Amino acid sequence: ASASTAGPTTLDAAEAGVPAGEAKAKDPASSTPKTKQSSASLFARVMAALLYGVSSLGVMFVNKLVLSAYGFPQPQLVALAQFIATATILYTCSALGVLRIPPLSAAVVKDVGPVSVLFLCNVLSGLAGTKEINIPMFTALRRFSILFTMMLQWLVLGDKPSATVAMSVILMLFGALIAAAYDLTFDAYGYAMIMLNNAFTAGNGVYLKKASLSPLMTKWAVMYYNSLFSALLLSAVVLVTEQEALTAVLAFPGWRDGVFVALFVSSAAMGCLLNYAIYVCTTTNSALTTTVVGCLKNVLTTFVSMVVMTDYQFTPLNFVG
């Protein structure tokens, strides 16, 4: 949940192990001279990818428990809690002088506004898809986000994929098509949400990378304003379209269950970590790398959820896909 995809922040050039003047970070697979400097950069890129994979895995399972196992009625409020937690933590750190966030300006809105809109749509569609589809199929269909990201990264940033990368993407999509063809729990609405999630993941990742290249924006500024704008937009959407649902949320019996409350708070806190991890991975590597890492960690997600969750129905071809 997502969810891309999605959503997002970077290390400073020094922290990422990338030269300060470097405008674009290449993928780990890029061929570079094997020097000490390039080795350090590769290590930073690998660690950024691992941070994203682990945090994304944790958020997915916690959200699945909150939305499906406990039946929390509003996935939008889960996303809102994550946005508020991220913005509150960063604002507090800024007020204490721990980090610096530039004041709000038209330039900030121009740089971060598109990212926030795409990020919000990415999270909402990911949460909706997670609720409607079992995790193995969710992770299989999420592979299409790689294709979308690869194409958009080429169009917007001019990063043309190599033939090897393109062939790898095709093979991953082939597996997803096999899995979808033999899915006994097919849900049209859930499938539609996942495909929208894929598109928003691609857009969010690519435009996040583009925003990170702005000299005005730091990683903390992108994280803070992205979460703040997304929280404001989502609050307006909920108040206008989900007024009756708010009553159901207030009356939700899970608020009296200590385990559920702990899971809900954990989801908000882990959402903050995930925002940071997405930004780090996207800016240290690339939007395509972040998307591929998201699909790689889904291998573990798929097998664990087949055992832990009860909504997966096994068929040999679906399993192979």
Image (cartoon, rainbow, N blue to C red):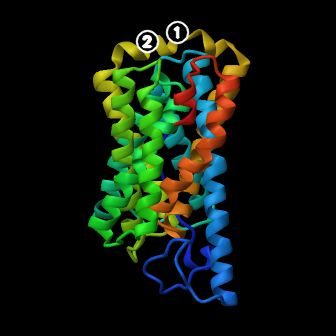
Q: Is residue 288 left or right of residue 316?
A: left
Q: Nearer the viewer, residue 37 or 247?
A: 37
Compute the Cα span from label 1 to label 2.
Answer: 6 Å
Q: Which mark is residue 251?
A: 1
Q: Amino acid at mark 1?
A: Ala
The relative height of residue 30 versus residue 114 in the rendered view (above or below) is below
Q: Which mark is residue 46?
A: none
Residue visible at 31% across and 67% down?
154
Whole-percent x, y for residue 31 in the image: 54, 81
Report if residue 227 is visible in the image. Answer: yes
Report if residue 232 is visible in the image. Answer: no
Q: Is residue 258 left or right of residue 318?
A: right
Whole-percent x, y for residue 296 in the image: 59, 50
Q: Amino acid at mark 2?
A: Thr
Residue visible at 49% across and 29% down?
130
The relative height of residue 84 versus residue 12 in the rendered view (above or below) is above
Residue visible at 63% across and 31% down?
62
Residue, disc 2: 247
Q: Nearer the viewer, residue 299 or 13?
A: 299
Whole-percent x, y for residue 27 in the image: 51, 71
